[in-house]
């Protein structure tokens, strides 16, 4: 399962793997996020973020 994009359902405190893979792609930066390193996501938007920086950018965009 190396270098395969996963499909996830993002939940409030966890995520559910819908299709197995080893990574997802950050919705803001386009960076690869290994599943074991995934910490930031948005449940409403169903988007993953590489770090708090990208999550902050998304929040600022949403508040405009």
Image: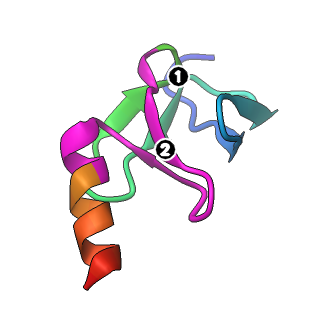
- Do the numbered discs 1 and 2 sit on residues whose CB atoms are within 8 Å? no
Name the residue at 23% across, 69% down: 60
Alpha carbon of mark 1 to alpha carbon of mark 2: how far?
A: 12 Å
How packed is label 1: few (under 14 Cα within 10 Å), some, or many (20 or more)?
some
- The magenta stretch is 37-55
Quadrant assignment for the C terminus: bottom left
Q: Name the residue that disc number 2 marks.
A: 41
Q: Secondary structure at mark 2?
A: strand
Q: Is residue 38 magenta?
A: yes
How packed is label 2: few (under 14 Cα within 10 Å), some, or many (20 or more)?
many
Q: Which quadrant holds residue 6?
A: top right
Q: Residue furthest bottom?
A: 64
The numbered mark at residue 45 is none
Towards the viewer: 30 or 53: 53
Q: Name the residue that disc number 1 marks.
A: 35
Q: Is residue 62 above or below residue 35?
A: below
């Amino acid at each position: 399962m190396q270098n395969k994009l996963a499909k996830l359902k993002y939940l409030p405190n966890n995520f559910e793997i819908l299709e197995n893979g080893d990574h997802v792609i950050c919705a803001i930066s386009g960076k690869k996020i290994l599943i074991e390193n995934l910490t930031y996501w948005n449940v409403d938007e169903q988007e993953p973020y590489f770090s708090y920086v990208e999550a902050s950018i998304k929040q600022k965009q949403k508040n405009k």
